[in-house]
Image (cartoon, grey):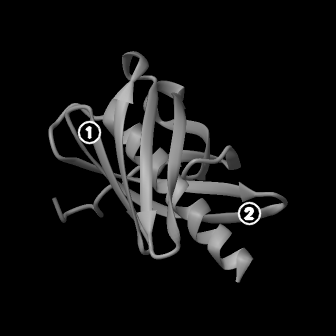
């Protein structure tokens, strides 16, 4: 049960990170982006794809049953966010790098220190097959 809760929290943290990257890298309002994320909870790793939407300096992300809401700060290089889900709530801080195509950060439960770390990279959409555009 504890591993499942930690897995959900790690996934949520990843979603927040992904949302942060979308804010910096995209210039259009309401832009959605996809990210490959890996989160560590002790020695356990949780991986998956997160979907993030950016509007101005606000980020909203969804991953499994978790929702993340964040703000782009520090000149567009950091996202401070909170997450909520069926197993609790907490905070996420992520730092953008690689011109908005990557991130690293940490997450924790509400009112506590860091529980884990995460990294992510933007998933580039595949080009449409020839003759379908």
Residue 86: x and y, percent?
46, 76
Is the residue 66 above or below the residue 110 in the image? below
Quadrant of the image for the N terminus? bottom right
Residue at (16, 59) in percent of width and height? 133
Extreme residue in the top direction: 75
**Residue 73 screen position, x and y as percent:** 38, 24
Tag 2, which secondary structure? strand
Disc 1 is placed on an element classified as strand
84 with respect to 131 (left or right): right
Do tag 1 and tag 2 residues touch (Cβ < 8 Å)? no
Residue ID for mark 2: 45
Up-down relation of residue 119 to residue 87 (above or below): above
Place of residue 100 in the rendered image (x, y in percent of width and height, measured from the top left): 44, 31
Res 13 → quadrant: bottom right
Asked whether the viewer can see residue 25, the reply is no
In-front residue for pair 101/89: 89
Image side of residue 125 versus residue 8, left or right: left
- Say which label, 1 or 2, has the lower sequence index: 2
Nearest to the observer: residue 65 or residue 34? 65
Residue of label 1: 58
């Amino acid at each position: 049960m504890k591993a499942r809760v930690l897995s959900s929290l790690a996934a949520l943290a990843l979603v927040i990170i992904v949302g942060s990257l979308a804010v910096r890298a995209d210039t259009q309002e309401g832009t959605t982006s996809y990210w490959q994320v890996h989160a560590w909870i002790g020695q356990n790793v949780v991986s998956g794809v997160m979907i993030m939407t950016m509007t101005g300096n606000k980020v909203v992300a969804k991953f499994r049953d978790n929702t993340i809401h964040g703000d782009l700060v520090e000149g567009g290089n950091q996202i401070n966010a909170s997450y909520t889900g069926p197993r609790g709530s907490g905070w996420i801080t992520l730092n953008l790098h690689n011109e908005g195509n990557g991130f690293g950060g940490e997450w924790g439960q509400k009112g506590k220190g860091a529980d884990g770390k995460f990294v992510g990279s933007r998933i580039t959409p595949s080009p449409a097959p020839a003759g379908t555009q």
